Image (cartoon, helix red, strand yellow):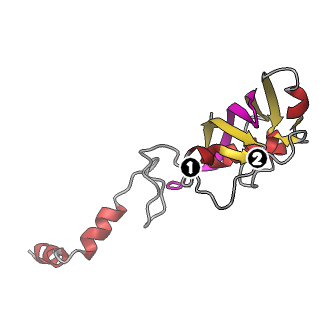
Amino acid sequence: MPIIINLKEDLKNENFIQRNYSIPFKNLNLPEEYSSEKDNVDVNLYIIKEKDSYVLSMDIDSDIKLQCGRCLEPYHMHLTPKSNVVLSKKKLDGNSELSEEDLNVEYLEDEENFNLNELIREEILVDTPMKPLCSEDCKGICPICGANKNINPCNCEKEQKRKESPFSKLNQLLDKK
């Protein structure tokens, strides 16, 4: 069930609100390869009302289960994205040139039915690395024997290079002596 915030009503008498949410991970409609050991995603949300917009500042605390791009082992990544987004009631003119500030602006279609789950979903997707690594120094898997080099270091690649080397014929001469 999505969390719908009525920005117009909630900020009618105040210029600032702060709320904490605990949203079930399964309610974020993330792709099926995303999973988490935690049941919920914790969100600390600050909303400031401005003349024609709202400024949202979010701290998200979650973890996701990923598969390493090198060794193919599953691991958990702790996510703590912090984001600032301006929700504007005005649409940008299609003919004008975008500035760097405009990249953090989203058009708010309905300020009475703002779906917080969609914004959190986007932040998690953007914060997930394209090529996840269990560690920066992950050695990956051996292309010859298929062993995880982090667990079982092997010499397959060195042996393969020696066999394919143009100097490998010299070894045969040494073996004859």
- In the figure, is residue 164 to the left or right of 1? left
Q: Quadrant of residue 33?
A: bottom right
**Classed neighbour count for the residue bearing mark 2: other residues with Cα under 10 Å, few (<14), some (14–19), many (≥20):** few
Q: Quadrant of residue 25?
A: top right
Q: Earlier in the sequence, mark 1 or mark 2?
A: 2
Amino acid at pointer 1: Ser
The location of residue 95, given as percent across then percent down, is: 65, 61
Question: In this figure, which residue is indicated by the disc labeled 2?
Answer: 90
- In the figure, is residue 82 to the left or right of 51? left
* Foreground residue among 51 and 49: 51
Magenta-colored span? 47-75
In the current view of this chain or complex, which residue is farthest to the left?
177
Q: Is residue 164 above or below residue 146?
A: below
Question: Judging from the image, what secondary structure is the residue with disc 2 in?
Answer: loop
Quarter holding the N terminus is: top right
* Foreground residue among 88 and 126: 88
Quarter holding the C terminus is: bottom left
**Classed neighbour count for the residue bearing mark 1: other residues with Cα under 10 Å, few (<14), some (14–19), many (≥20):** few
Residue drawn 45% across the image and 48% down it: 138
The location of residue 4, given as percent across then percent down, is: 89, 38
Q: Is residue 76 above or below residue 68?
A: above
Question: Judging from the image, what secondary structure is the residue with disc 1 in?
Answer: loop
Question: In this figure, which residue is indicated by the disc labeled 1?
Answer: 99
